[in-house]
Amino acid sequence: NAGVTQTPKFQVLKTGQSMTLQCAQDMNHEYMSWYRQDPGMGLRLIHYSVGAGITDQGEVPNGYNVSRSTTEDFPLRLLSAAPSQTSVYFCASSYSDGTVNYGYTFGSGTRLTVV
Amino acid sequence: SQKIEQNSEALNIQEGKTATLTCNYTNYSPAYLQWYRQDPGRGPVFLLLIRENEKEKRKERLKVTFDTTLKQSLFHITASQPADSATYLCARDSGGYQKVTFGTGTKLQVIP
């Protein structure tokens, strides 16, 4: 079991460039989320999905898009990178029975720098 | 808004002592609170989940409490070891397919 796999691990972008952060899980989890982590700010939710074809916004969705065409994959797209998007991005998945979210499994993170 | 707050100051304790970390929440009580451990450069790792109607939950040297009157959860590590040094995150979950909101975490340093 690979768990949650994120690629790339590191990325440097120029302002205005776009890119996609990949996230895949092999645990058949319905619930997937993207968080960004900044010093002193903790983990902030960007977007989340409760199943294939269903996505919703989190706390800081501006500048990011997501889609969920399969249970396994949940890519995060940066539309036009800005220095404020410099951060560490974590993808996470969990099993939920619709009542209880049984704890996230996190990926190892993508460290993104926008110059 | 539904906030979750953790003491941002680092906690230093002597090896063998019990470490106690605090998580406070605002507004209505979440259905669940989750606790995670995060080591530098790594993603958080899930440790424990406690439900609103549970007063206490244990797992090996870990103990979590949930006090809806104080709007607080306490996370205890007994017989602490240097290997327990990490940042510990608290998260609130309102249940169902709801957003999970994290606190900023408390850094624990266990001194040999």
Image (cartoon, helix red, strand yellow):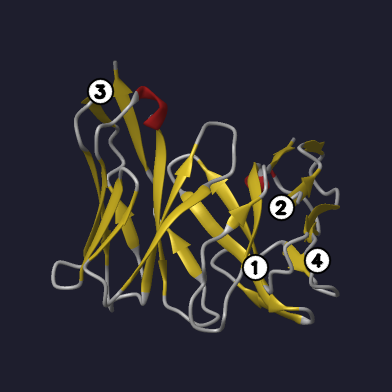
Of the image marks 2 and 4, the number of the one nearer the N terminus: 2
Label 4 resides on the chain identified as A
The crowding category of the residue bearing disc 2, from other C-alpha atoms within 10 Å (few below 14, some 14 to 19, many at least 20), is some
Q: Position of residue B6 (x, y in %)?
A: 30, 50
Q: Residue at x 25, y 32 (%)?
A: B79
Which of the two residues, B33 or B79, is positioned nearer the viewer here? B79
| Spatial separation of the CA atoms under disc 2 and disc 4 | 10 Å
Q: In the rendered view of the protein, which quadrant contains the C terminus of chain A?
A: top right
Circle 4: residue type: Glu
Q: Amino acid at mark 3?
A: Glu
Chain assignment, label 1: A
Q: Which mark is residue B5?
A: none
Q: Return the residue at label 2.
A: A3
Q: CA distance from mark 3 to mark 2?
A: 33 Å
Q: Secondary structure at mark 2?
A: loop
Q: Secondary structure at mark 4?
A: loop
Give me the residue at 59% from left, 32% from top.
Answer: B41
In the displayed structure, does residue B49 sit left or right of residue A57? left
Disc 4 and disc 3 on one polypeptide chain: no
For residue A64, what is the image quadrant? Answer: bottom right
Type of amino acid under label 2: Gly
**What residue is shown with label 1?**
A47
Q: Which residue is mark 3?
A: B15
Viewer-proximal residue among A104 and B99: A104
User: Are the residues under badges 2 and 1 in a single subunit?
Assistant: yes
Residue A72's disc number: 4
- Tell me which label, 2 or 1, sits earlier in the chain: 2
